[in-house]
Image: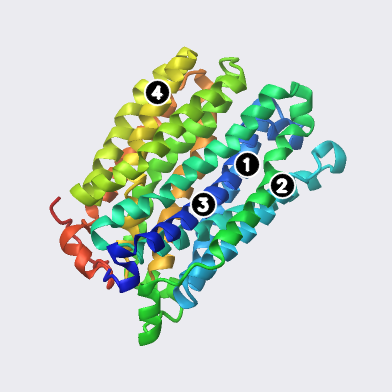
Amino acid sequence: MRTSPSASPSASPSMARIAAASAAGTAIEFYDFFAYGTAAALVLGPLFFPDASALAGTLAAFGTFAVGFVARPLGSVLFGHIGDRVGRRPVLVGSLLLTGLATTAVGCVPGYAAIGPAAPVLLVTLRFLQGLGLGGEWGGAVLLVAEHAPERRRGLWTSLPQTGPAVGFLLANGIVLALSAGLSDAAFRSWGWRVPFWVAGALALAGLALRAALPETPAFAAAAGRGDLARVPVSELLREHGRLVLLTAGAMACGYAVFYTVTTWSLAYTTEHLGMDRTVVLGCVLVAVLLKGALTPLVGLLGDRFGRRRMALVGTAAMGVVVFPYAGLLASGSPVAIAVGSAAELIAFITVFAVVGAYLPELYAPRVRCTGAALGYNLGGVLGGALTPLVATRLVAGTGTPWPVAVYVAAVALLSLGCFAALPETRGAAAADATAGCAADRRAPRPG
């Protein structure tokens, strides 16, 4: 990715502003997504599926949670087309607006007792729109930074949008934690759970103000100037680089499985099977996510130093190994043990996800980069994020212990490890030709 004068290391104020606006918008969009996940784990089952048993209600709530992940690849195609044909900047505005409106509306949907079957139908529809918006967000956000960033610090700069999910999670669950601690259980279930969704509207307006004046990226401007734009990006991508998309999707799956095991499914498991207070468990998870977010830029720097692929291989292997002690610590019911286990798994997770903001865009040529990077990333979300809470809830229902979940996550880690091993390194020799994209049809990984 050749740097233009505006993207040179000396232009640090401009680079800092671009990275800050990208990270802030990503935080807001993931806030929207995580607010729903926490509500699904804690209250949506009995409110929207009251005739189901406790297990069936939880599964139904997590089913609506999964709908958002299924929509994300479609959002990648829709907003990726805009990003590869019109520009990266419009993606940032459109995706944020769609997600913000859908999330605010979730907080206004009456429960099953008020409008009957229309309630879950509306819930699923809005969750789908949420996922559609988020499917476009990640690709636009990281590309805006990656295509402006100086080559030697691309990993560092692109790690900053990757702090957005941690900030969004902390904000969403911090609000839920405060409401849960300050309200009676009846008040929380009646109206308190809706407050985080209403807050989303104000946050979306703030994010739009930050992003409105952002410049277009040099890589897209150069491609547009040459007329080197794909007519139908997704068609070209799947026709010429389908293998690369599948490999990146498989590589991302483990991180999603781990993240939603720790941050979403664990809430349902500890409150329903262990009888723990939801406020205590949320506090444990928040500590772990805070540590993960703080370490993200450091891991981005390590990716610049040692290589994206190497860091991803180490992190994926660690996720598959650490999940077993994590399961034991979770089953103990000790808040300190749960916080330690959650932190260990999320540190392994961020060893991968801090570097993929640079890695995935470098794998694709500019003409299909917005679609390709986002589609691979979000297909991984379907494989790892959508299925994991459902599978984990079903596995635990038979035994009451989290060990089958650990085996499941370890199996996903093996899949992701194989996919990363089949991908090339993009740091160093590949960085010089990153504007043209790393060769998508390379079969053998580069050393390092």
Q: What element carries label 4?
A: helix
Q: Distance between the residues labelled 2 and 4?
A: 32 Å
| Label 4 packing within 10 angstroms: few (<14), some (14-19), many (20+) | many
Identity of the amino acid at label 4?
A: Gly
Sequence-wise first label, 1 or 3:
3
Q: Distance between the residues labelled 3 and 2?
A: 22 Å
**Residue projecting furthest to the left:** 447
Q: Which residue is drawn at 49% across and 57% down?
A: 21
Q: Toward which corner of the image does residue 373 lie, by quadrant?
A: bottom left
Q: Is 394 displayed left or right of 298 in the figure?
A: right
Q: What element carries label 2?
A: helix
Label pair 1/3, CB-CB below 8 angstroms: no
Label pair 2/1, CB-CB below 8 angstroms: yes
| Label 3 packing within 10 angstroms: few (<14), some (14-19), many (20+) | many
- The N terminus: image quadrant: bottom left
Sequence-wise first label, 3 or 4:
3
Identity of the amino acid at label 1?
A: Tyr
Q: How far apart are marks 3 and 4 (CA)?
A: 28 Å
Q: What element carries label 1?
A: helix
Identity of the amino acid at label 3?
A: Ala
Sequence-wise first label, 2 or 4:
2
- Label 1 belongs to which residue? 36
Q: Can residue 397 be seen in this view?
A: no
- Label 4 belongs to which residue? 341
- Disc assigned to residue 235: none
Identity of the amino acid at label 2?
A: Val
- Label 3 belongs to which residue? 24
Q: Which residue is drawn at 48% across and 49% down?
A: 382
- Label 2 belongs to which residue? 106
